Image: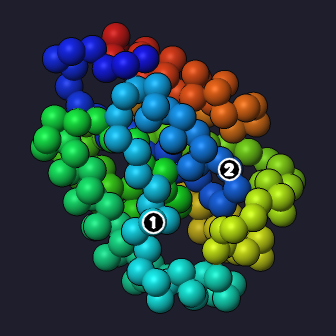
Amino acid sequence: MRLERGAAPRAVVVFGVAGVGKTSAARRLAERMGAAFADADDYHDRRLIAQMSAGIPLEDEDRWEWLWRLRGLTDAALQRGESIVLACSALKTAYRDILRGDGADTIFVELALPRVALQRRIAARTGHFMPASMLDSQLMSFEPLTEAERAGGSFVVSAASGVDDVADEIIAHLDAGIRR
């Protein structure tokens, strides 16, 4: 699914807790859409990465500047007339509210996976700063999509299948939303 010539650009935020497959799904989705890709982890302050690496959960106050930085990134792409896919934890509704802006051109895709599968994925990955011990704090903080967010076009996708299947399901939802 490449954006049709003249189609309105949009920001798609693929979100969820650690280990759900945000980065892989978002990267594949961006490829298929012909959109820019960004991983929110690349925009964390080094001090906060060190804090998370040490197993210390972030507080809301630690996240605000980062979220506004990400919002600036998506706003800039949209202002240039480009679509962007962002992989971001966006654990709370308040975080998504910042990322959403005026909301008309931002869609959130919540990736869902059972806890045991999340643990298995986190244990298998290498080279990531987030230790497996942080999963519990993320699950405790996580706020799923609200009814209002769903009414605005955001949706949930199971991350249990392969990355291609996840990207296909997201594209099907996005296509259906365009045709509404």
Q: Are marks 1 and 2 in contact (CB under 8 Å)?
A: no
Q: Which residue is mark 1?
A: 42
What x and y, as percent, mark residue 143? 55, 57
Please, what is the three-letter code of the amino acid marked with disc 1?
Asp
Q: Quadrant of residue 105?
A: top left
User: How much space separates mark 1 and mark 2, taking CA atoms?
Assistant: 17 Å
**Image-based side of 93 in relation to 68, left or right:** right
Dot 1: element: helix
**Residue at horizontal 80 percent and vertical 54 percent from the top:** 121
Residue 56 occupies quadrant: bottom right
Q: Position of residue 70 (x, y in %)?
A: 32, 61
Q: Where 99 falls versus 5 (above or below)? A: below
Q: Nearer the viewer, residue 88 or 176?
A: 88
Q: Quick one: which residue is furthest to the top in this view?
A: 179
Mark 2 = which residue?
Answer: 20
Point out residue 176 in the picture as x, y percentages from the top left corner. 43, 14
Query: Image height check: is 5 above or below 160?
Result: above
Q: Residue at x 63, y 58 (%)?
A: 17
Q: Is residue 155 visible?
A: no
In front here: 78 or 62?
A: 78
Q: Earlier in the sequence, mark 1 or mark 2?
A: 2
In this view, 173 is above or below 123 = above
Query: Which element is circle 2 on?
Result: loop
Indicate the quadrant containing the N terminus: top left, top right, bottom left or bottom right: top left
Give the number of marks. 2
Image quarter where the C terminus lies is top left
At horizontal 56% and vertical 49% (from top left) the residue drawn is 23
Question: Label 2 sits on what residue type?
Answer: Val
Rendered image: mark on residue 103: none
Is residue 55 visible to us here? yes
Name the residue nearer the viewer: 19 or 136.
19
Residue 155 to residue 138: above or below: above
